[in-house]
Image: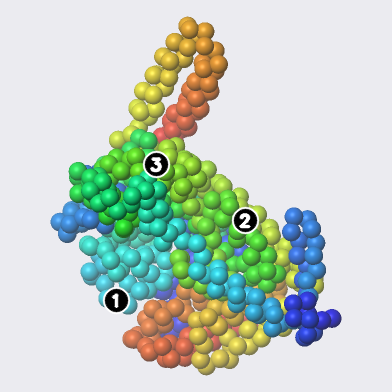
């Protein structure tokens, strides 16, 4: 049997590929197999790295928002009051200087977060026990229940159903957290 | 020092335990990035701030640690020799960044080296739990215990909407990076990996070669980790990764089966050639060693080779790195001396097993 890749040397490696239930038989010589795996290794190694690309991503974003990109004073205006990091510097290093930066650059940050985190901008995971606690959630829950009541009073049932689902989801979260506390 | 003794001291004891699916999943890791409220992040903080972060941790260590965590030892980077730091990096306990760029950098290590906490790296605190086999959920559980213990005494930088605030926007939210190291020779040999990697990427996961970013996939070892940290709960992140890993395991097993069926003798030949190289070579470079070690491990998994323990891949992948070789040699080595030492160490390690079985 002759190698499928080079059509010259005899095939030394034979295998069956099963992709989505579709079976393909492959016969290639060792040399071609070697070449392929080397090629792959190099590509696989240099793989996609979000951190390296981040600075570039941030740049694109800022240019996009300010078509006259070099309008120096405009970008210089935003500067974190706590650590003095400017948006320009943030873009260059791709890192926040302090917790306040998140607030300072909030507006510019949203599209960036969306890109990096598949469209998400809001945290739905762990809440620190002591400083966060379930308090935030419970407060939010109370507010939502008030809104629900208003909607029902006003007979806006579609909106009411919507917020009812949200309340249920939130209650589940509070409940889950409560369980976490006990364990 | 005898190799046996050296191994006992050199390898993390968690590596002795064979976790679930450990024929394909070498290790599971969970990392939580945390920062302290009111302190500038490490990218911009002053020496004084770095020092006070370290002091805060030291103070916290004085109080009792949860029994599930056990004793934690603090190691400051300034106290270590260059070679000692390198060995910690090669064991994946700390990052090169902590060694090279940190101010008042330190780490906390548990006895079994399952837990390592980096202090003053890219974030004030990075909690890491490393376990053998596929045990992401267990690793997350442990990391959470440690996280809660720290939070009892220290205020974290946390925002109601954005979650845990981190230096890099890619970590904001949960600050969680979950990853697994997988040995996938079957998928590489059958070239399915080329199709699988883009598919994994589409699921919001990242695939890399061994040893993090920008390095080659040495020895058919791949690291798979989550990319998204915002808008998904910790539990979902870990569950999603675990289920993808389980699918990859199934595909790898199927690929191995197919290889045995279609090219048994070629595969056996490949395995024993590599075994021959490892047991006879006098000079061997990292790349060749990695390839051969991967073949031998596959040979063990498939039953071609019977007198060598499975842990050889995990062990040799770590031990044949430059830092470890120099530690074993007891001093600095030139590159060609390393290749000689590497060959010698591999031969000795293989002998250790064959002697035991004969």
B70 and A39: which is toward the camera: A39
Could you tell me which chain the residue with mark 2 belongs to? B
B157 and B293: which is toward the camera: B157
Q: CA distance from mark 2 to mark 3?
A: 27 Å
Residue ID for mark 1: B82
Could you tell me which chain the residue with mark 1 belongs to? B
Residue that lies at the very extreme toward the bottom in this rendered image: B282
Q: Quadrant of the C terminus of chain A?
A: top left
Q: Secondary structure at mark 1?
A: helix
Q: Is residue A63 visible?
A: yes
B354 and B224: which is toward the camera: B224
Question: Is residue B206 left or right of B158 when viewed as pictured?
Answer: right
Question: Is residue A163 left or right of B82 when viewed as pictured?
Answer: right
Residue ID for mark 2: B199
Q: Image point 52% across, 70% down: which residue?
A: A45
In this rendering, is residue B258 above or below B321?
above
Q: Residues within 10 Å of mark 1 (few under 14, many from 20)?
A: few
Residue ID for mark 3: A110
**Residue B178 x/y as whole percent:** 48, 53
Q: Image point 55% across, 70% down: which residue?
A: A43
Quick one: label 1 or label 2, which is nearer the N terminus?
A: 1
A44 and B54: which is toward the camera: A44
> Based on the displayed image, in which of its 4 quarters is residue A128 positioned?
top left
Question: Is residue B269 left or right of A123 when viewed as pictured?
Answer: right
**Residue A164 x/y as whole percent:** 51, 19
Q: Is residue B148 visible?
A: no
Q: Secondary structure at mark 2?
A: helix
């Amino acid at each position: 049997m002759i190698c499928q890749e080079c059509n010259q040397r005899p095939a030394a490696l034979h295998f069956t590929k099963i992709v989505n239930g579709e079976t393909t038989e492959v016969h290639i010589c060792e040399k071609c197999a070697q070449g392929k795996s080397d090629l792959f290794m190099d590509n696989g190694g240099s793989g996609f790295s979000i951190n390296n690309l981040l600075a570039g991503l941030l740049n694109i974003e800022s240019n996009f928002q300010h078509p006259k990109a070099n309008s120096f004073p405009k970008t210089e205006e935003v500067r974190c009051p706590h650590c003095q990091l400017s948006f320009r510097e943030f873009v260059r290093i791709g890192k926040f200087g302090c917790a306040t930066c998140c607030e300072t650059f909030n507006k510019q940050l949203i599209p960036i977060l969306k890109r990096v985190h598949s469209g998400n901008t809001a945290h739905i995971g762990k809440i620190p026990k002591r400083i966060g606690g379930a308090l935030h959630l419970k407060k939010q829950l109370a507010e939502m229940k008030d809104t629900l009541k208003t909607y029902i009073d006003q007979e806006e049932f579609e909106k009411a159903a919507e917020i009812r689902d949200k309340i249920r989801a939130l209650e589940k979260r509070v409940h889950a957290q409560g369980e976490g506390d006990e364990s | 020092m005898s190799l046996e003794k050296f191994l006992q001291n050199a390898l993390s004891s968690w590596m002795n335990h064979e976790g679930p699916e450990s024929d394909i999943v070498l290790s599971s890791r969970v990392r939580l990035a945390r920062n302290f409220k009111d302190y500038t992040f490490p990218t911009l903080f002053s020496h004084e701030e770095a020092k006070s972060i370290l002091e805060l941790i030291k103070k916290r260590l004085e109080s009792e640690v949860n029994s599930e965590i056990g004793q934690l030892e603090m190691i400051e980077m300034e106290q270590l020799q260059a070679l000692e730091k390198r060995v910690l990096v090669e064991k994946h306990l700390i990052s090169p960044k902590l060694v090279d760029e940190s101010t008042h950098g330190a780490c906390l290590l548990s006895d079994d080296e399952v837990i390592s906490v980096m202090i003053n790296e890219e974030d004030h605190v990075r909690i890491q739990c490393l376990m053998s086999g596929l045990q992401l959920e267990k690793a997350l559980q442990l990391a959470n215990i440690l996280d809660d213990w720290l939070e009892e005494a220290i205020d974290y930088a946390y925002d109601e909407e954005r979650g845990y605030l981190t230096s890099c926007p890619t970590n904001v939210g949960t600050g969680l990076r979950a990853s697994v190291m997988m040995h996938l020779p079957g998928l590489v040999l059958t070239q399915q990996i080329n199709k699988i990697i883009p598919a994994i990427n589409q699921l919001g996961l990242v695939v890399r070669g061994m040893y993090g970013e920008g390095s080659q996939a040495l020895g058919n070892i791949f690291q798979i980790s989550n990319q998204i940290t915002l808008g998904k709960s910790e539990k979902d992140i870990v569950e999603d990764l675990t289920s993808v890993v389980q699918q990859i395991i199934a595909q790898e097993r199927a690929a191995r089966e197919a290889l045995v069926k279609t090219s048994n003798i070629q595969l056996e030949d490949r395995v024993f050639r590599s075994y021959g190289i490892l047991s006879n070579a006098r000079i061997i470079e990292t790349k060749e060693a990695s390839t051969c070690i991967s073949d031998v491990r596959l040979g063990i998994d498939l039953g071609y080779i019977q007198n060598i323990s499975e842990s050889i891949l995990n062990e040799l992948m770590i031990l044949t790195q430059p830092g470890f070789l120099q530690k074993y040699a007891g001093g600095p080595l030139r590159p060609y001396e390393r290749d000689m030492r590497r060959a010698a160490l591999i031969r000795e390690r293989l002998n250790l097993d064959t002697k035991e079985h004969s």
